[in-house]
Image (tube, rainbow, N blue to C red):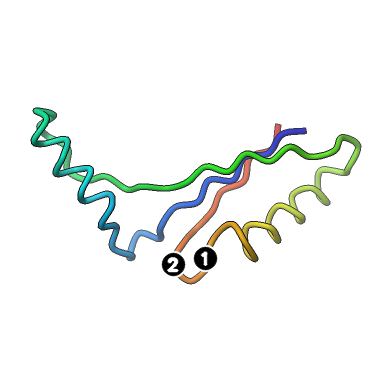
Protein backbone atom coordinates (compact mmCIF):
# COMPACT_ATOMS: atom_id res chain seq x y z
CA UNK A 1 0.00 0.00 0.00
CA UNK A 2 1.31 3.41 -0.92
CA UNK A 3 0.54 6.65 0.90
CA UNK A 4 1.36 10.22 0.04
CA UNK A 5 1.62 13.06 2.54
CA UNK A 6 1.68 16.55 1.08
CA UNK A 7 2.96 19.20 3.49
CA UNK A 8 2.66 22.92 2.85
CA UNK A 9 2.92 26.12 4.81
CA UNK A 10 -0.30 27.46 6.29
CA UNK A 11 -1.74 30.33 4.21
CA UNK A 12 -0.91 32.95 6.86
CA UNK A 13 2.78 31.93 7.00
CA UNK A 14 5.16 33.80 4.69
CA UNK A 15 6.90 31.65 2.07
CA UNK A 16 10.24 33.28 1.14
CA UNK A 17 11.23 30.31 -1.02
CA UNK A 18 7.99 30.62 -2.98
CA UNK A 19 8.56 34.36 -3.40
CA UNK A 20 12.08 33.70 -4.74
CA UNK A 21 10.69 31.22 -7.28
CA UNK A 22 7.96 33.70 -8.32
CA UNK A 23 10.57 36.41 -8.93
CA UNK A 24 12.82 33.99 -10.84
CA UNK A 25 9.92 32.95 -13.07
CA UNK A 26 9.35 36.60 -13.90
CA UNK A 27 12.98 37.12 -14.87
CA UNK A 28 12.80 34.02 -17.07
CA UNK A 29 9.90 35.55 -18.98
CA UNK A 30 7.00 33.76 -17.31
CA UNK A 31 4.84 36.83 -16.71
CA UNK A 32 1.55 36.84 -14.84
CA UNK A 33 2.57 34.53 -11.99
CA UNK A 34 0.96 36.19 -8.97
CA UNK A 35 2.15 33.79 -6.29
CA UNK A 36 4.06 30.57 -5.63
CA UNK A 37 3.91 28.38 -2.53
CA UNK A 38 6.49 25.63 -1.98
CA UNK A 39 5.62 22.36 -0.24
CA UNK A 40 7.01 18.88 0.16
CA UNK A 41 5.71 15.50 -0.93
CA UNK A 42 6.45 12.41 1.16
CA UNK A 43 5.72 8.96 -0.29
CA UNK A 44 5.42 6.12 2.21
CA UNK A 45 5.19 2.41 1.39
CA UNK A 46 3.07 0.53 3.96
CA UNK A 47 2.47 -3.16 4.59
CA UNK A 48 -0.75 -4.52 3.09
CA UNK A 49 -3.57 -5.85 5.24
CA UNK A 50 -3.92 -3.01 7.74
CA UNK A 51 -7.46 -1.62 8.04
CA UNK A 52 -7.93 1.74 6.28
CA UNK A 53 -8.93 3.58 9.47
CA UNK A 54 -5.78 2.35 11.23
CA UNK A 55 -3.57 3.32 8.29
CA UNK A 56 -5.03 6.83 8.21
CA UNK A 57 -4.58 7.22 11.97
CA UNK A 58 -0.93 6.10 11.73
CA UNK A 59 -0.25 8.46 8.85
CA UNK A 60 -1.83 11.39 10.67
CA UNK A 61 0.33 10.64 13.71
CA UNK A 62 3.47 10.41 11.50
CA UNK A 63 2.65 13.71 9.83
CA UNK A 64 1.78 15.45 13.08
CA UNK A 65 4.85 14.23 14.98
CA UNK A 66 7.57 14.19 12.31
CA UNK A 67 6.68 15.07 8.74
CA UNK A 68 5.03 18.45 9.35
CA UNK A 69 5.39 21.24 11.86
CA UNK A 70 1.76 21.67 12.96
CA UNK A 71 2.42 25.22 14.13
CA UNK A 72 3.22 26.52 10.63
CA UNK A 73 2.29 23.69 8.23
CA UNK A 74 -0.80 21.83 7.08
CA UNK A 75 -0.78 18.34 5.56
CA UNK A 76 -2.97 16.21 3.32
CA UNK A 77 -2.93 12.42 3.23
CA UNK A 78 -3.73 10.21 0.26
CA UNK A 79 -3.73 6.41 0.39
CA UNK A 80 -3.79 4.17 -2.69
The residue tagged with tag 2: helix, strand or loop?
loop
Give residue 28's quadrant in the image: top left
Q: Is residue 74 left or right of residue 1?
A: left
Image position, residue 33 (x, y; %): 17, 37
The picture places residue 73, in percent across and down from the top left corner, at 47, 61
Q: Nearer the viewer, residue 77 or 22?
A: 22
Q: Which mark is residue 72?
A: 2
Q: Residue at x 50, y 51 (%)?
A: 7
Q: Is residue 30 left or right of residue 60?
A: left
At 23% across and 43% down in the image, what residue appears?
A: 21
Check the picture and name the quadrant holding the C terminus: top right
Residue 61 vs residue 40: left or right?
right
x and y, in percent, of residue 52 in the image: 81, 43
Image-quadrant location for residue 2: top right
What residue is rendered at 40% in x and 58% in y?
9
In the image, farthest residue toward the right:
49
Pick the residue in front: 17 or 56. 17
Which label sits on residue 16? none
Q: Is residue 15 above or below residue 41?
A: below
- Marking on residue 69: 1
Counting labels gives 2
Q: Residue furthest top?
A: 29
**Circle 1 — which element?**
loop
Mark 1 in CB contact with mark 2 (< 8 angstroms)? yes
Residue drawn at the location 59% of the way across and 57% of the way down: 67
- Callout 1: few (<14), some (14-19), or many (20+) C-alpha neighbours within 10 Å? some
**In the image: residue 4, left or right of residue 1:** left
Amino acid sequence: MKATVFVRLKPEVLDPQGDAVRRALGTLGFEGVKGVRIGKLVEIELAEGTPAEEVRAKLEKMADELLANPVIEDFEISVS
